[in-house]
Image (cartoon, rainbow, N blue to C red):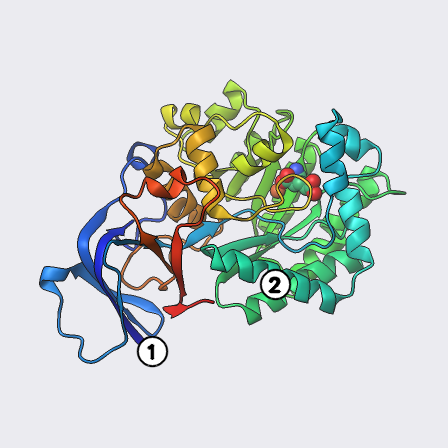
Amino acid sequence: MSKLIINIKQLTQVRSKDISFVKPERMNELPSISDAFLFVKNGVIADYGKMSEIPNFGDIETINAKDKIVLPAWCDSHSHSVFTGNRSDEYMQRIKGATYEDIAKNGGGILKSSNQIKSISLEDLFQESKKRIKSLIRQGTGALEIKSGYGLSYDSELKMLEVTNRLKNSLPIEIKSTFLGAHAVPKNYKKEEYFNLVIDKMLPEFVDKKLVDFVDIFCEQNYFSSDDTKLLCKRANQLDIRVKIHTNQFNSIGGIRAGVDNGALSVDHLEVMTRDDINALKNSKTMPVLLPGCSFFLGIDYANARDLLSNGISFAIASDYNPGSCPTGNMNFILSLACNKLKLTTQQAINAATINGAYAMGVSDKTGSISKGKIANLLITDKIDSIDDLPYYIGDNLIEKVLIKGEEFN
Ligand code: NIG
Ligand code: FE
């Protein structure tokens, strides 16, 4: 039950438990203790400090982390990691010149994944997703938000949410479930007709079944409008459910303003931004979530992280793991991309992938930093020279051990 990590070269992201996210002017700081110990009791961080001041913990299981860095596990606040099948055919079409939007118009994209979800049993979807998420945990993810949105019918959305609920009960990491019924309009439906089904029937019934932590919508041309987004926010607020919004991926159509004005927890993507979008985010409690893996894979613009910082706006980074626009949930790779393409320092990227990510999925009181009383979801790196080695070795995971609630995850 107890565990001690000793001789830690650098214990990184050490913060007081009441810091729920890191402000932009502080994102370049990663408070650390060199030559440190960390003590875990009952799955929780119970103590930490300098080796020179280590108390006598008696005869307990001990990990020697000499020359290694210890940091909080990744908090991936945006994923569609419950899915089946793949869309490698579309990848090849895009390489030959088709756009994401072209493919969607021809019945591919989200609608293709939705057909694949319809024909798989709940049990098989659960087993497939569990295997996938176990591999994410081995890569260092200790908190994961999972969206529905490939069901696009009452029964299939319910199936996805039930799978996520079973994952919550069978995996040791923090999992949050987001209902994304308003992801696309299914065939044979008018947009209004389907959207009404989402907000009048699916949302309240799924909330009632306790399957929903958050609700999401794809606010984009040819999908759902900013008025739809406002209405969804209002309904969610009545049900006491926070909103996360896919917006500004291809066009700026008012999704950010709608979200901020209606108390959204996060606005995600933000590859295309206007001055009004930036102004809406200033001084708001809504966390922007940037998804560089999606820009990389689709070959679209990257979000302008530097512009957010210079306007006093914090943000998180997340994977967006899904079969269409980012078929990886490897947060080590996302960290590398964030440094390389969003031009972040290692410190900014780690803050964005830990405590700010935790905030964007409502778990920053439990995880995302090395703080007494938070759960012991920890990464122990290989022997490395510096924290900068993490983003530098692109495509490599320099994580030697992942501890979830203090237990090594294999
Ligand atoms: O976040 N943009 C909307 N939704 C997903 C992609 C879904 C898909 O293409 O399957 C995203 O990129
Ligand atoms: Fe997404």
Name which residue type carries label 2. Answer: Lys
SS at badge 1? loop
Look at 37% across and 23% down and name the residue there. Answer: 310
SS at badge 2? helix
The residue carrying mark 1 is 1
Q: Is residue 395 left or right of residue 62?
A: right
Q: Is residue 233 left or right of residue 2?
A: right
* Residue 333 to residue 278: above or below: below
Badge nearest the viewer, 1 or 2: 2
Q: Is residue 186 left or right of residue 100?
A: right
Q: Nearer the viewer, residue 132 or 107?
A: 132
Q: Ligand 1: which quarter?
A: top right
Look at 67% across and 53% down and name the residue there. Answer: 148
Residue lying at the far top of the rendered structure: 275
The residue carrying mark 2 is 131
Q: Which mark is residue 333?
A: none
Q: Label 2 neighbourhood size at 10 Å, few (<14), some (14-19), many (20+)?
A: few
Q: Where on the picture, by quarter, is residue 269?
A: top right
Q: Where on the picture, by quarter, is residue 216?
A: top right
Residue 348's x, y, as percent?
35, 37
Q: Label 1 neighbourhood size at 10 Å, few (<14), some (14-19), many (20+)?
A: few
Q: Where on the picture, by quarter, is residue 195?
A: top right
Is residue 367 something that shows in the picture? no
Residue 35's x, y, as percent?
17, 55
- Alpha carbons under labels 1 and 2: distance apart: 26 Å
Residue 263's x, y, as percent?
51, 41
* Residue 57 to residue 85: above or below: below
